[in-house]
Amino acid sequence: MRHTFTPILFFGALMLAGCAATNDPYKNKIRLFQKGKIKEDTSYVYHLPYEEGKSYRLIQGYFSAFSHKNRAALDFKMKRGTTIYAAREGVVIRVKEDGDRGGWNKKYRPYGNNIVIQHPDGSRGGYWHLQKDGALVNVGDTVKTGQAIALSGKTGYAAVPHLHFMVWTNYNDQWQQVPTRFQTRNGARYLRPWKKYR
């Protein structure tokens, strides 16, 4: 089954960082996936981006009303300094860790520390709002699923300390958001806001 995703804004291959919104008519369909009303088993199943056995609350899910209204991204509430793990294997293509400010004002957007990993199929996973000097990997490193890659923080456009995670892929020469399933103790599923996952 082929799904159509709406592109997000890029300069070259780099996304504008932060929890901002873009239009995406796919949001109604992904909500049906989240509720289990539509079944599919073809998408890649990601690992949760934190230590196995621990659980964190998803404070924003795909297309949540606060700042993800039209964005296929996830926000996991985490204390500063929590270790972030790669949700999928790949090569590190971007590391920013020099940002030292954050808050709920767009002026902080340029300070958002992040890591981007390119996966074997060409899709990319982004990890945002990382701690200053919190990267545990470098550009060019090959990482495995479940490998420690960074420390969480509250840099950039962020109201509270959290990990902002999203995946995007190039489809018909346009970079597009990709809602993703995760392996949880209750099986593979699209995550829903305000729940904890282990």
Image (spheres, rainbow, N blue to C red):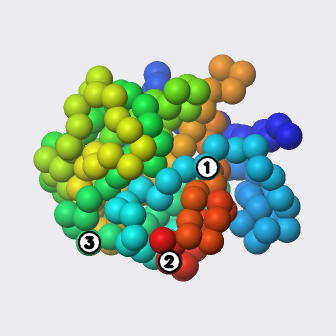
Let me know if residue 5 appears in the view. yes
Report the front residue among 64 and 109. 64
Q: Of the residues shown, which amino acid type is indicated by label 1?
A: Val
174 relative to 3, above or below: above
Cβ atoms under marks 1 and 2 closer than 8 Å: no
Residue drawn at x 33%, y 28% as measured from the top left:
142
Report the front residue among 196 and 29. 196
Let me know if residue 8 appears in the view. no
Task: Report whether 110 appears left or right of 125.
Answer: left
Q: Position of residue 52 (x, y in %)?
A: 39, 64
Residue drawn at x 64%, y 65% as measured from the top left:
187
Q: Of the residues shown, which amino acid type is indicated by label 3?
A: Lys
Q: Image quadrant of residue 32?
A: bottom right
- Numbered label attached to residue 79: 3
Q: Image quadrant of residue 16?
A: top left
| Residue at mark 1 | 45
Eye-nearest disc, 1 or 2: 1
Q: Position of residue 128 (x, y in %)?
A: 36, 51
Q: Image quadrant of residue 54?
A: bottom left
Eye-nearest disc, 1 or 3: 1
Q: Position of residue 60 (x, y in %)?
A: 52, 69
Report the front residue among 21 and 62. 62
| Residue at mark 2 | 196
| Element type where label 3 sits in the image | loop
| Element type where label 1 sits in the image | strand
- Numbered label attached to residue 113: none
Of callouts 1 and 3, the N-terminal one:
1
- How much space separates mark 1 and mark 3, taking CA atoms? 26 Å
Q: Position of residue 160 (x, y in %)?
A: 33, 71
* Other-residue count near label 3 (Cα within 10 Å), few / some / many at <14 / 14–19 / ≥20: some
